[in-house]
């Protein structure tokens, strides 16, 4: 199915560039490339019923809430993404995208450039790989982007209209971080519905895994050891008592980093799209369940609802 050939590329763009890697720079490093499901779905129908050809896609997406692996970081805002993507019949492609956030100043917070390849290993198995670069519109010299680059790989196995997806994204630069996604989707389309060329429905379930490094400090006061990440408060004898007495204040005794990896969120979505000639409009509601990556992570773990609306046009 042509849908399954394009799906690995589309799904990997949904890799969440999420939680920060030090407590002091959480917000500034959080806003990474976040291509939404609605924007990704807007590419499907343009390729679904065609033989491999070269084409150019432009799209615009609106999302009423901005979540990174189910987390809003205490900032409730909408976001919008516009993109221009050129696909070559050989499987090579190039993409340019811009990312706008309602609480950002300037609103156009960043743009991205990427190049990649997608193709079939077998009739059932597809592969995709790409590399990209994030460019901030107004970089903050106090909180530089530590993850400006990414590299992704994705595998998709299809069975009739069902599809199983696994993808991995490595983000790097001043720091490194990983995201791993497992998902399953179903695709159903109805052609020539009244004056509409095609209506497509794509329910899917996705689990997002990732890593997070927490920078912490340990200090003694009295007989208790405290850790600033909130994970340790251990009564113990203070071997640094003389240092504390001489200084007359708390004495920091240890700095370190703890690394966590695990399930970050579960996303249930169902995209509905309408295609007429080369124009496509879609609506996708989401239910997202955030999962604490470590016991003291301060996030809302209740189910979160948001939706996305997108439109796209294909030039052939």
Image (cartoon, rainbow, N blue to C red):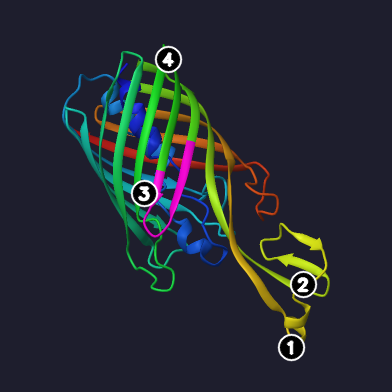
What residue does disc 4 label? Answer: 161
Q: Measured from the top left, where is residue 73 in percent x and y?
A: 57, 57
Q: Which is more toward the observer, 160 or 214? A: 214
Q: Measured from the top left, where is residue 158 in percent x and y?
A: 40, 16
- Whether residue 193 appears in this view of the structure is no
Circles 3 and 1 in contact, beta carbons < 8 Å: no
Q: Which mark is residue 239?
A: 2
- In three-dimensional space, the C-alpha distance between marks 3 and 4, rounded to whole angstroms, equals 28 Å
Q: Tell me where the magenta segment starts and ends, as one range.
A: 170-180
Circles 4 and 2 in contact, beta carbons < 8 Å: no
Mark 1 secondary-structure assignment: helix
* Other residues around mark 2 within 10 Å, as few (<14) / some (14–19) / many (≥20): few
Quarter of the image with the N terminus is top left
Mark 2 secondary-structure assignment: loop
Mark 4 secondary-structure assignment: loop
Q: Which mark is residue 81?
A: 3
* 180 on left or right of 295: left
Q: Which is more toward the observer, 123 or 103? A: 123
* Other residues around mark 1 within 10 Å, as few (<14) / some (14–19) / many (≥20): few
- In three-dimensional space, the C-alpha distance between marks 2 and 1, rounded to whole angstroms, equals 14 Å
Nearer to us of marks 1 and 4 is 1
Magenta includes 9? Answer: no
Could you tell me which residue is drawn at 39 percent across and 16 percent down? 190
Disc on the earlier residue, 3 or 4 = 3
What residue does disc 1 label? Answer: 246
* 182 on left or right of 189: right
């Amino acid at each position: 199915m042509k849908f399954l050939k394009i799906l690995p590329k589309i799904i990997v763009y949904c890799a969440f560039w999420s939680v920060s890697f030090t407590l002091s720079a959480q917000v500034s490093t959080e806003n990474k490339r976040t291509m939404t499901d609605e924007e990704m779905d807007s590419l499907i129908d343009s390729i679904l019923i065609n033989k491999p050809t070269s084409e150019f896609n432009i799209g615009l997406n609106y999302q009423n809430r901005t979540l990174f692996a189910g987390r809003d970081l205490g900032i409730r805002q909408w976001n919008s993404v516009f993109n221009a993507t050129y696909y070559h019949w050989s499987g090579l492609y190039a993409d340019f995208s811009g990312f706008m956030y309602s609480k950002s100043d300037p609103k156009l917070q960043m743009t991205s450039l990427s190049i990649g390849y997608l193709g079939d290993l077998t009739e059932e198995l597809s592969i995709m790989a790409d590399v990209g670069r994030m460019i901030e519109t107004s970089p903050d010299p106090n909180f530089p982007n530590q993850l400006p680059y990414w590299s992704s790989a994705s595998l998709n196995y299809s069975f009739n209209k069902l599809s199983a997806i696994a993808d991995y994204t490595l983000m790097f630069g001043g720091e490194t971080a990983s995201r791993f996604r497992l998902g399953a989707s179903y695709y159903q389309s109805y052609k020539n519905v009244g004056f509409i060329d095609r209506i497509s429905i794509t329910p899917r379930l996705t689990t997002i895994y990732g890593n997070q490094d927490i920078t912490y400090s340990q200090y003694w006061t009295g007989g208790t050891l405290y850790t600033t990440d909130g994970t340790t408060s251990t009564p113990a004898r203070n071997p640094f008592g003389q240092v504390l007495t001489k200084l007359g204040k708390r004495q920091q005794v240890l700095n370190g980093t703890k690394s966590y990896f695990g399930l970050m969120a579960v996303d249930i979505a169902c995209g509905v799209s309408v295609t007429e000639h080369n124009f496509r409009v879609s609506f996708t509601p989401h239910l997202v369940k955030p999962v604490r990556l470590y016991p003291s992570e301060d996030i809302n773990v209740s189910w979160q609802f948001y939706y996305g609306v997108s439109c796209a046009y294909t030039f052939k």
